[in-house]
Image (cartoon, helix red, strand yellow):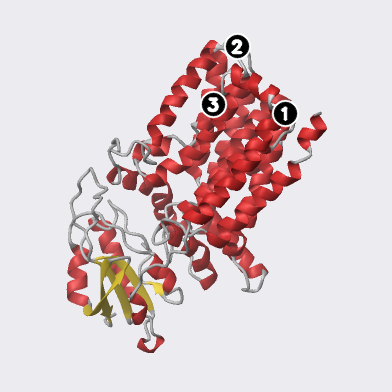
Amino acid sequence: MNNIVRTPNFIFYSILAIANIFAYSFIEPHFQLFDSALFKLQLIYPTQGWLPYKDFVFIYPFGPSLLSLFIDKLSFGVFNLITFVWPIHFLLQLVIVEQIRKIYSDQNIHTIVTILVIETLFIAKLGGEPFSVLLTFILCLEYFTTYQTKKITWKIFAYSILLCFVRWDRLVFCLGILFLYRAFCKIKGVDFEITHTAKLFLISLSAILLLISSFFIYGNENFYNVMQYVFFDPFIIAKFRSLPFKWDNNILSILNIYYFILLAYILVGCSLIKEKFNDRKVFFYFLGISLFIPTLSRSDVGHFLPFYISSLFLIYSLPSFFSRFYLKSKKLILSINGIFCFFIIFIFSFLITQSQVENTCNSFNDLKYGYKSIFVGNSQYDDFNINYPYLYLQNINLKPATKYISDEPGIQNNCDRAQEIIKDLDMAPKPSIFYLNKSILIDKNNVNQYKNCGLLEQYFSEKTKTIGHCEINQSQIEVRISYER
């Protein structure tokens, strides 16, 4: 009977592969003008000879940039990491499937594959970097595996390094999950070796120290600035981009799902407290909240979706009567999961259309103008508004005129940073083309108001001249040029 249940495993592997192919081929990111564009720039710019934190700045570690540069050199400029994003994503998913096999002796993979199919489609639609969510799950699952085997392997250190060099903050979330899980075990009277937990903490923390050391080796003359970009700027940005929590009038809104999930956590948490201790259920409960913290800083879809994905692991923490039903209805549930996987891909195929970015700014990209650098920003910084890094991507042959390729609250309006940007603009190869967003963002984003010193606006007025206007997704863009050096 068990063999009959396990035989369709290859079907679920195939479904997972199909989901990744579908994500690569058909899904356009929702945030392709900003987050998705920034991630691609992070991978392409190093292959153009422009260095992270020196020629362009982003607030995450440079692991993907270094890997993209390595692939570029290894293939003599034919490929970069963009080519292998979804194959790597698929391989990381296979690691998770094997980890679940180790934890659950029945070795059925249909539940975890269903979760990963949803993750694939949601992450693809979200856009941006697709690795850190899976690496978060992998590292947390490896923590739990060490408790079951009582052995700490090299994998803990390897996964910690991989996650740290992509998103160091999510490595910290993993450590938080480890702490909460062990604290709950202690409360329930379950004995554990404190030295074992301490070793795991130290191994993961050593990955952060390795990241800091790599920053020092990479740019010791610019070490303070790199530390500022990666470890301090995210908190400045989070402060000014915070959004209040609110209830949408549409009860089935994707934002309202957040509150239903929190209710589910309360109910499942109560059942875990009342039931006999089950280490697997407790662990997956805490794994579900591994991506909860970012939702506290900003209540929008971009921050909610990763938490929604991690919350799918609650299915492994459901009360005992669900487990008994599962044991009695394995083949039924297996069939339902298989149908559901195909169904969600089928639904996405109807919902997803190849949306074209409305961009009339391409008329200024003609090589005959001889531009040598590009700046994409806003015409004013009294209130926060996004710029469109997508325009950097459309002009990938032009050097960014400043290292600050994304407009962030608390950065461009800051006098010291504005002076740094102006210095970059003065030193940039000329002529420089400027794309300045004139539209006002309806969603102000910055609950915490900030002051603008006006240096950038003064620079635009005095050292550039308007040569035209264009639109990108109905946002008015003023196009300027600078010949002065």
Proximity of marks 2 and 3: CB atoms separated by less than 8 Å = no
Element type at mark 3:
helix
Alpha carbon distance from label 3 to label 1: 23 Å
**Image disc number at residue 173:** none
Q: Is residue 24 left or right of residue 332?
A: left
Q: What amino acid is labelled 2 in the image?
A: Lys
Q: Which sits in the foreground, 385 or 178?
A: 385
In primary-sequence order, the first of circles 2 and 1 is 1
Residue 164 visible in the snapshot: no
The label number, if any, that marks residue 285 in the structure image: 3
Q: Which residue is mark 1?
A: 151
Kind of element beneath mark 2: loop
161 or 34, which is in the foreground? 34
Q: Secondary structure at mark 1?
A: loop
Q: Is residue 362 visible?
A: yes
At 47% across and 61% down in the image, what residue appears?
353
Inter-mark Cα distance, 2 to 1:
26 Å
Instruction: Point out residue 190 in the picture as x, y percentages from the top left corner.
Output: 61, 13
Of circles 2 and 1, the one toward us is 2
Residue beneath disc 2: 276
State how far apart marks 2 and 3 are (Cα). 15 Å
